[in-house]
Amino acid sequence: MIDVSLELLDKYEKGIAEPSAAIYERLAELGCDIQWLITDVERKTSEQLGMTSNKDLQAVLDRAVRAEGALEQAEKTIRLLTEQMQRGQ
């Protein structure tokens, strides 16, 4: 269904790894409430959030994708800096 190994699923459950945006997107496509999955809080409808159009919802999705990209870049930078520090640079 979502093509995740049992080993990776175990890491998700233990908090060792975080699912990618693609995994969350696939879970959402399958009907999973992603907000509840991440926060343990039921999601609100778009109307309750003040969003009345697909354009509003797309804007939120776009911001989430950009945020994930920024997080991935920050993680890469941290890894590079850590490697440089370990080499004494």
Image (tube, rainbow, N blue to C red):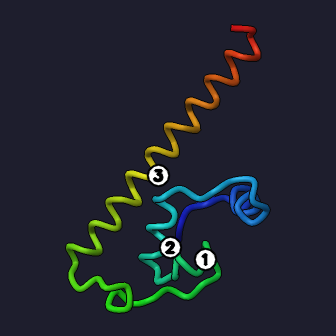
Expressed as whole percent of the image width and height from the top left, the position of residue 19 reads: 59, 59
Name the outermost residue toward the right.
14
Marks 3 & 2, CB-CB < 8 Å contact: no
Dividing the picture into quarters, in which one does residue 47 lie?
Answer: bottom left
Give the residue type at disc 2.
Leu
Q: Looking at the image, tell me whether mark 3 or mark 2 is earlier in sequence order.
A: 2
Q: Which mark is residue 37?
A: 1
Q: Which residue is mark 3?
A: 68
Q: Which residue is mark 2?
A: 27
Marks 3 & 1, CB-CB < 8 Å contact: no
At 32% from the left and 60% from the top, the residue drawn is 62
Dividing the picture into quarters, in which one does residue 89 lie?
Answer: top right
Give the residue type at disc 3.
Glu
At 37% from the left and 85% from the top, the residue drawn is 49
Expressed as whole percent of the image width and height from the top left, the position of residue 58 reads: 27, 69
Marks 2 & 1, CB-CB < 8 Å contact: yes
